[in-house]
Amino acid sequence: MAGILDDIKVVEFAQNAAVPYCGRLLAGMGADVVKVEPPSGDAMRGLAQLAPNEAKAFAAINPGKRAITLDLGAHDARRVVDALFAWADVALVAFKQSDLERYGIDDVSARVVNPRLVHLTHTPFGPRGPDADVGGYDVLVQGRSGQGFTANRTENGTPMSTRPAMNDFGTGIASALGVVAALRHRDLTGEGQRVDASLLGTAVGLSTPTVNYFEASDAEPLAQLDEDMALLRSVGTSFEDQREVYEQRVVAGGGVFRLYFRHYATADGLISVAGLSAGLIKKFHDVTGLELPDRSDPHGAQFNSVVKAADELFLTRTTAEWIGALRAAGFPCGPYNMPHEAINDEQIRANDFIIDLEHPAFGKYSASGEPVRFSAAQADKVGPSPGLGQHTVEVLAEIGIDGGVVDQLMADGVVTTPE
């Protein structure tokens, strides 16, 4: 069955995770996505290799695409770049801004060739401001956005970056949304446009519940918090202790999160529970028999004693037993999987959130499927990730480059094919 983006052609100039994941989502919706890699390949091909130029991370992020190689710095590369832009409906570009014009892959150059082109431009920290030209990664925006302060685990008293790289993959989803919105605009107006996405913008967006400010209620408490934090840091207080102070002072509903919206250890593993309304809280206590705590003092002795009792109680029964009891009462809960356990979770499999693929170089593997489905235009399942340069000759012919020119480009090392 044709996908909702059937007949949409995408060229991807990007490595690593964020924008390639956008390309992967578009491919899953039926788009023809051509990934352009340097002759050495996407950097992800070198991580946890399964075969030469084939690796776990690359295979998981890039199913369903075709791949060509192109040395963007070569003299004749612009000929291929312009032909790709003329062929494509969408360009996905993730390079330093200083390199965009140098390689002729910026949105202005691209839309001179094809005015209807949707050009997704990714910059780690956004296209404006003092760090617009600075390279960046997920861990950097975790720190800068404030997201890491609440999300990061700690080791030896300092925060560790959160994995998986949620801002990379969140940016992939946000970028796909931007692309389909721009395609809708093109349908209405005939005009292409530049769409900007960034890791930092995604990090702030994902932090909506915590990265906000309300002058009427926050000005005085936060000013006092800044003073107290400065004092704590000056005497070498650990990061965990600083975060505890922050959560006690700032995080609304901190008490309910300690009891009703968390993970518990059970007799044979872990369970996740989540219920914050008054009705759900009552059900939690009906099932557990725990006393209602004094929620006016969520870090006081009585509240702490209830939390301790809950920790001890959940250890007395298995995860399955607790899920059965809590769900029978209508309290939301579920299993807490390790990543490899999630691969075979019945609910995940039932919705094709994980799909099985067969790669010619290393065999069977499983990777994420589409997070969004369409009842009227559901694309067929995508194929495996492409080999390095696998489709170079095929794609160059499709975009109108003569066979003799292709031979010369290969002789000059501008493009390559698999050995």
Image: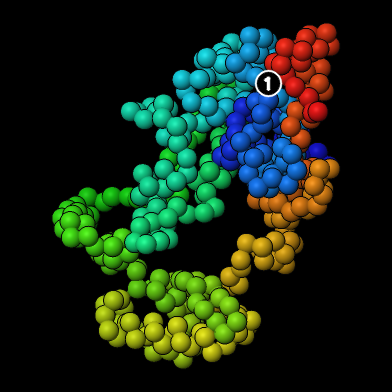
Horizontal relation, residue 279 to residue 295: left or right: right
Q: Position of residue 114 (x, y in %)?
A: 64, 14
Q: State the image quarter where residue 82 is shown.
A: top right
Residue in front for this viewpoint, 254 or 417: 417
Q: Secondary structure at mark 1?
A: loop
Q: Residue at x 60, y 31 (%)?
A: 14
Instruction: Locate the N terminus by quadrant.
Output: top right
Q: How many marks?
A: 1
Residue 9 visible in the picture: no
Q: Position of residue 128 (x, y in %)?
A: 38, 27
How was the colour assigned to the protein in this rendering?
A: rainbow
Horizontal relation, residue 358 to residue 172: left or right: right
Q: Is residue 110 above or below residue 54?
A: above
Q: Residue at x 52, y 49 (%)?
A: 165
Q: Residue at x 68, y 21 (%)?
A: 70
Residue in front for this viewpoint, 219 or 49: 49
Indicate the amino acid at tag 1: Leu
Q: Residues within 10 Å of mark 1 (few under 14, many from 20)?
A: many
Q: Is residue 150 above or below residue 50?
A: below
Instruction: Locate the C terminus by quadrant.
Output: top right
Horizontal relation, residue 415 to residue 332: left or right: right
Residue tagged by mark 1?
70
Residue 338 visible in the picture: yes
